[in-house]
Image (cartoon, grey):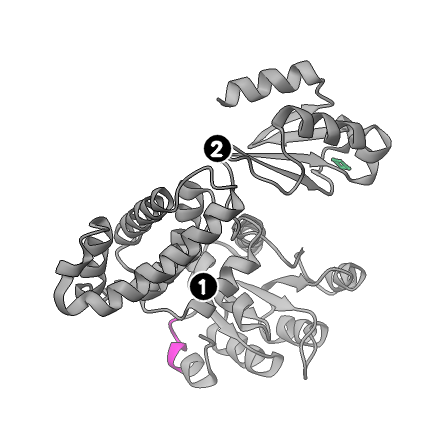
Amino acid sequence: RMDTMNESSALRGKGADVVVIDDEESICEGCRQTLEADGYYTATAPDGIQGLQMIQDLQPRVILVDLKMPGMSGTELLSQAVQVVPTVVPIVITGYGSIDTAVETMKIGASDFITKPFTPEKLLGSVKRAMSLSEARYGAPAVKPVPAEPAEKAELTREAALLQGLQAVGEFCSLGYEKREFLAELRRIEAEAEEHAASIGHAKTKREIVLEMVRDLQVVDEIIQKHAFKKNALIQILLDVQNELNWLPAHGLRWIAARLNIPEAEIYRIANFYEAFSLERRGKHLVQVCTGTACHVRGAPKLVDRVAQVLGIQPGETDRDMKFTYQTVHCLGCCALGPVMVVDDTYYSDPSVKDLEKIKEACN
Ligand code: FES
């Protein structure tokens, strides 16, 4: 949801910590959810003109400005914003390739720039630094009352019945008037199970996979309940599901959409935007080998082969037991160690076959 000028006027006097100005609604919404989950009052605007008005009305401490916007450009907005609110600390959002421009904008007052796509951590890190800068320059903000969260409990009856039904796969006929909806969901789950069974070489039967998917839904449902069905906790819910299941399965996303009454398309926009999310089934352990230039010249191609040999899968594949997903990536940011492999969060410099076997053993 994009805040409009009217909402901006309604917020006047209340103030905001951060204003995000970007013509891409998914970016505004993603930033708003991430920042609000971390306790920042956040408002968003879809273009420079509305953004400038909002900055004037809300007097934020930090603004996030997209450089490339139709109408008033980010650079233009920046130079006007610092005149309207001289205490504001701007951060520039830029796409790949406009880094030179971003550096230019730092000369006219931007404190930092973040390149798209960015992770919630990167966004929060940059905003926290900007807040500290603002505090160091202009003092701590006045303490604001914490607004009470409206209890936004979704209608549970239909979904609760569906969940119970899913738990009782095989006995769905007893579901009475919920039967048609339940059958439709079950058919979709079965179709997905079919696909998964094919993709992992029928190591498991379709029935086993359906049961697994039903268990996934229980996990997803517990996470949604933990977050009290709050729509503005969507990113945190997705992160928790990713952590628990190692991916965001389609049936899980459908479930979240139904439970929170959010369009599926919106959930997919966010899931596609952040690197932290995977819409592909992942193994328990993620193995990545860097094939960036520095690693390549130091022997990455041989390391790629060694890892494939020890794991028994090629880059881009997941093993049948769902233990390992193997990927190649471009630069892990530690080129001096090259060629580098990372397993979950542990980095290894040029491991031999023996080292790899030990690492694999330790994961079992
Ligand atoms: S090129 Fe491999 S870590 Fe940078």
With respect to residue 69, does 61 lie above or below? above
Q: Secondary structure at mark 2?
A: loop
Reading the image, the residue beneath label 2 is 321
Residue at x 23% of width, y 69% of height: 180
Image quadrant where residue 74 sits: bottom right
Q: Position of residue 291 (x, y in %)?
A: 76, 38
Q: What crowding class fits label 2: few (fewer than 14 Cα within 10 Å), some (14-19), or many (20 or more)?
A: few
| Residue type (three-letter) at the residue carrying disc 1 | Ile
* Distance in Å between CA atoms under marks 2 and 1: 28 Å
Q: Is mark 1 within 8 Å of ligand 1?
A: no
Q: Nearer the viewer, mark 2 or mark 1?
A: 2
Q: Position of residue 144 (x, y in %)?
A: 35, 61
What segment carries the magenta color? 10-14
Of 208 and 330, nearer the camera is 208
Task: Decide which of tag 2 and tag 1 comes sooner along the chain.
Answer: 1
Residue at x 50% of width, y 58% of height: 271
With respect to residue 36, does 169 lie above or below? above
Q: Position of residue 326 (x, y in %)?
A: 62, 37
Task: Name the disc covering residue 279, or none.
Answer: none
Q: Residue furthest right?
A: 297
Q: What crowding class fits label 1: few (fewer than 14 Cα within 10 Å), some (14-19), or many (20 or more)?
A: some
Reading the image, the residue beneath label 1 is 267
Picture quarter with ligand 1: top right
Image quadrant where residue 255 sits: bottom left
Residue at x 67% of width, y 71% of height: 78
Q: Secondary structure at mark 1?
A: helix
